[in-house]
Image: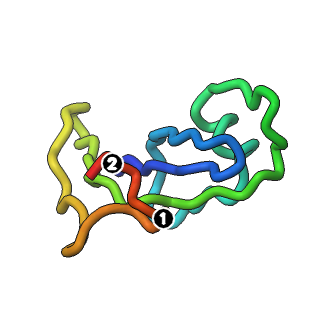
Amino acid sequence: MPTYDYYCPGNGKTIEVFHGISRKLETWGELCELAGEDVGETSSDSPLERLLGTGILIDSRGGKEPGPGPAAGGGCSRPGGCGCH
């Protein structure tokens, strides 16, 4: 299962989660629920941005396999990039 990084502009936090390819999280509340994190002072309805990440996959034996990595020109869509690529 691939990993995804989601960024919340409302609080400046990025959280990495595992989920199926067809799923896309839309709000801070959805992300926190999946990641087992407390929403804190950020509104549960705050929108998210899915970042380009490394796409690490978890194979059926439970090991990690490297994914394709960021696209050419890499980095995320945030102004100035996120510094994680």
Residue 31 left/right relative to 20: right
Vertical position of residue 82 compared to residue 41: above or below: below
Residue 12 left/right relative to 17: right
Q: Nearer the viewer, residue 41 or 37?
A: 41
Residue 67 left/right relative to 23: left
Rendered image: mark on residue 79: 1
In the image, residue 41 lies at what x, y percent?
Answer: 81, 30
In the image, residue 65 lies at what x, y percent?
Answer: 16, 44
- Picture residue at 44% right of the left edge, 43% below the top: 18
Rendered image: mark on residue 11: none
Residue 29 occupies quadrant: top right
- Picture residue at 41% right of the left edge, 61% below the top: 80
Residue 4 left/right relative to 60: right
Three-letter amino acid code at disc 1? Pro
Rendered image: mark on residue 83: 2
Three-letter amino acid code at disc 2? Gly
Residue 38 occupies quadrant: top right
Q: How many marks?
A: 2
Q: Nearer the viewer, residue 13 or 70?
A: 13
